[in-house]
Amino acid sequence: MKIKVLSCAIALASAMAANAQTNVMDINTTKVGAPVQKTMYGLFFEDINYAADGGLYGELVKNRSFEFPQSFMGWQVFGNVKLKNDGPFERCPHYVTLSDPGHKERRTGIQNEGYFGIGVVEGEEYRFTVWARAPKGASAIRVQLIDQNTMEENQQFTENKLDVTSADWKQYEVVIKSPRTFNKSNLRIYLASANPVDLEHVSLFPVNTFKNRKNGMRRDLAQALADIHPGLLRFPGGCIVEGCDLETRYQWKNTIGPVENRPLNQNRWEHTFDYRYFPDYYQSYGLGFFEFFQLSEDIGAEPLPVLNVGMACQFQNWDKEEAHVAMDDLQPYIQDCLDLIEFANGDVNSEWGKKRAEMGHPEPFNMKFIGVGNEQWDELYFKRLTPFVEAIRAKYPDIKIVGTSGPDSEGKMFDLGWEAMKKQKADLVDEHFYRPESWFLSHGLRYESYDRKGPKVFAGEYACHGKGKKWNHFESSLYEAAFMTDLERNADVVYMTAYAPLLAHVDGWQWRPDLIWFDNTKMFKTVSYYVQQMYAQNKGTNVLPMTMDKKFIAGQEGQNGLFASSVIDKNTGEIIVKVINTGKTAQPVSINLNGVKGERTAETITLTCNEMDAENSICQPNKIVPQNGTLACKAEKKAVVIEDTLSPMTFRLYKVKK
């Protein structure tokens, strides 16, 4: 993490704290508490804000198989181009034929705009592939990256010739090296022969994908996910699990197998909650369930797939029974769950385990959790969930089932959801709360009162935002850090967490705030990202009891806006203390590590800012980043004491070897 010196802020904090009363905190390091689950501080992925196609998924071509309802959406065509639908791939039958235009002064070709442009980086290589055939004798195409906005006659800044020699469908490949960095290039393909050529599944990927995988992830975005050290990855959503209707629900079986034969699906997020419309927002399914499982493995996260429970989006259909699957017709949906478990965990001789092996992963993915339904509520959901639970328990008793308490963080429907999940003996309950700053500051003791014998908590979607300020400003991120002390202190009941949404394209977002923002060549991590990272990289193995004036440090009255939690990492021998000052004045703290003796030095990581509305951006990605430091501790007879002064609006983490 980058070190930034805020000398003025530190000096000001010291001056303000000179006459303030010291806040004495006690940690019993000999009384090791509940284990912190490995699944804590995870990631929630949904294809919203162009997070998949145009984002994490490395494909740079939009509508690569001409399957959008408007077949040339994303493309310009010129000359003699014809669209046909008897291609080699059953579920993606469309392709184009490029033929001689018949006039020497004209050319035939197609040009793709990508997702808000095609981003390329100087010196990087890009793999162009296409399924093609030459039905009337050998043909050729010219493949160009162009700057369509230049006024020059020759817009291309790269050009490669590709010979198409076979009359049968065959995949061809050429690697293109970009001589420049450009956010909004286009891909142009010219016919370069008198003979016609048929083209299908036109694709352009960076060679340098995450883990160098073909059909892989954009490296910088995937690496940012890995760098959090997430405990789990929940996928594929979100509302897209449900779809606008059942026909457009996410169907995992359509997302596996050869990418050329994965059918297009409408994206639930083509319509936003503020009525903006993205008519070209579809799911190519190139980032499918195999890729999700593989990504989970690559970044060290437990996979948590969520499947449809036989319901379309309740927000759009409210309480319309007829919009959802009839109880007697649920069996195919139940079978999808059972087949998914076999796909993830079955041996290579099983039907679905064999399909996984054929895709290149004979070893099981060792999936342990499955979500059934997304953010559903009331009896429409509860009665449909029952046969799913019964079937999964009967065949796979070791799989943990995640149910949902609906979209509310409290209230009648929330209570009904928890009551139903307890009755059905769900293993975990997925809670969602997108709430304002006041909510996060007032819920520092949310989980202390939860039933310890009931289902465990998955805080599956949450983010803080200010009133009228739904962006990633520093203040809201700090309040998320404060609230997360409660998640950590209650590790005996809170087993999983995930901030949401995860990714957003600066030119095509439907929802904010978001954890990571990007354009076609760059990205930046929000302050909320660094909060999540500080927790995930320092979650320890067990909770340690921590109090101030014999109370949990949770922003209660008289606690001067302080929030805190502590853990021990048995693997490293470190005691890790997280303290957040949400107040507008500096706070002196004295943290007693009772049971530790001798001289010690604390490592510190600090996240702070003087501007509450400040945020990172594409232009200033490192405006607010964690700062590393050290602090000498005071050795007393029965304890080691950390004496410090926290600046206003500061999150500081201390690590001391026991």
Image: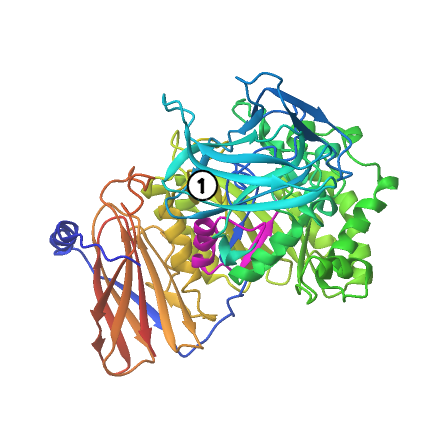
Q: Is residue 402 left or right of residue 149?
A: right
Q: In which quarter of the image is the C terminus?
A: bottom left
Residue at 38 percent of width and 58 percent of height = 534
> Where is 182 relative to 540, above or below?
above
Could you tell me if residue 151 is visible in this image?
yes
Mark 1 neighbour class, 10 Å CA radius: few under 14, some 14 to 19, many 20 or more:
many
Three-letter amino acid code at the position of disc 1: Asp
Q: Is residue 221 magenta?
A: yes
Q: In which quarter of the image is the N terminus?
A: bottom left
Q: In this view, does 584 lie to the left or right of 17?
A: right
Q: Which of 318 and 60 is in front in this view?
A: 60
Percent across and percent down for residue 409 are 54, 42
Q: In this view, does 452 lie to the left or right of 442?
A: right
> Where is 208 relative to 493, above or below?
above
Percent across and percent down for residue 315 are 64, 31
Q: Nearer the viewer, residue 499 or 80?
A: 80
Circle 1 SS class: loop
Percent across and percent down for residue 201 are 65, 38
Q: Which of 492 and 218 is in front in this view?
A: 218
Q: Which of 626 and 280 is in front in this view?
A: 280
> Where is 218 relative to 629, above or below?
above
Q: Is residue 538 left or right of residue 419?
A: left
Percent across and percent down for residue 99 are 65, 25
Could you tell me if residue 272 is visible in this image?
no
Residue at 39 percent of width and 60 percent of height = 552
Residue at 81 percent of width and 63 percent of height = 350
In this figure, which residue is indicated by the disc labeled 1?
514
Res. 18 image quadrant: bottom left
Q: Give the range drawn in magenta.
A: 214-236
